[in-house]
Image (cartoon, rainbow, N blue to C red):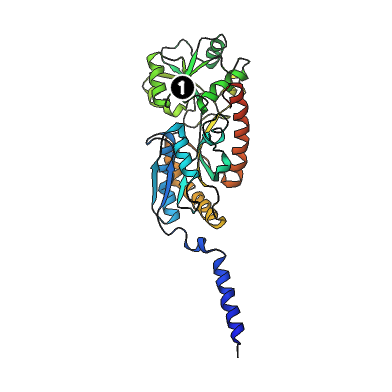
Amino acid sequence: MTSFKTQIAAVMAGVLALGTSPALADYPERPVTIIVPWGAGGGTDTIIRLFSIGFEEAMGQPINVVNRTGGSGVVGHSAIANATPDGYTLGACTSEITYFETIGLAPITPASFDLISRLAVIPAGVTVAADSPYNSLEELIAAAKKGGLSSSGSGLGGPWHMAIAGMMKQVGGDVNTVQFIPSQGGAPALQDLVAGGISMFTGSPIEARALADAGEVKILGIMSDERSPAFPDVPTLKESGVDWSLTNWFSLCAPAGLPEDVKARIEAAAEQAHGSAEVQEALAQRGITPLFDGSEAFSSYAAAFANDAAGLLTDLGLAQ
């Protein structure tokens, strides 16, 4: 006959076995929220909403996308970082997390989050007005090195500011040779470009595509290692002899401290969703390059990106 002590030991062993991974057995039990630190209809918002179609199916729960804007991305990213790390509040971290602290905006770094994976990348480009005298990258760069030109597309120190600064540094100019005019995003910057207020737009060519199709702007180059499938006729800077690229990225993240089993569940569901034909095709149709690198590779990439950004922002005189 089994002794009472033996029965108790067996029960306790069972409890401990169940207790090793309760979150994975139950998670997710309710809807999951993804905080987007940027406005509705923008690039980050579009990517997350398209991804969420597949993510909702993979998670088996509704996915609520909430926009928390303000402070050049600080408000939304702070909300993500300060949320309870239980897997029910996730976020759409963007490249700003690698330099918020560098430029003194907020004590936010990649370590403030559990980084799940990049979801998509969008390279910077070089776009001019249709009536611009420059018809090639070579012509524009030659003029830019002489001074007197301006660019826009993001806030000071933002990715599109670093795009033009890095390009000018690579061609032997000063990072501030082209005056950068801060803007609230690509749309107002492109309006300024068409109106003649700035010389070039160094943001995403995707944002400029509608105006290019309408004959109001010319996309002269793209800052990626290879030509974009969305713009097969637009040369890369490297094809024009400029060894420079800058790709903005958009990711799925969570507040730091997720239970490991919950994090693994999220990453597996995210990879499944991202790989679905529905999500892949929806992103590609909009000229967005899908990318899924997973938590380990993404964490390494973010650290390297932060280091490169710190160097460029120091050159620009924006590092605190």
Whole-percent x, y for residue 243 in the image: 62, 23
The N terminus lies in quadrant: bottom right
Whole-percent x, y for residue 224 in the image: 55, 29
Q: Is residue 218 above or below residue 78?
A: above
Query: Is residue 202 visible to us here?
Result: yes
- Judge by depth and name the residue closer to the eye, 190 or 136: 190
SS for callout 1: loop
Which residue lies at the image location 52% right of the left edge and 34% below the top edge?
106
Which residue lies at the image location 58% right of the left edge and 80% below the top edge?
8
Whole-percent x, y for residue 117 in the image: 54, 44
Position of 283 compared to 293: left or right? left
Position of 42 compared to 260: left or right? left
Residue behind mark 1: 182
Quarter-of-image position of residue 300: top right
- Judge by depth and name the residue closer to the eye, 164 or 70: 70
- Judge by depth and name the residue closer to the eye, 187 or 83: 83
Whole-percent x, y for residue 304 in the image: 63, 35
- Name, please, the residue furthest toward the bottom: 1
* Amino acid at circle 1: Pro
- Judge by depth and name the residue closer to the eye, 254 or 121: 254
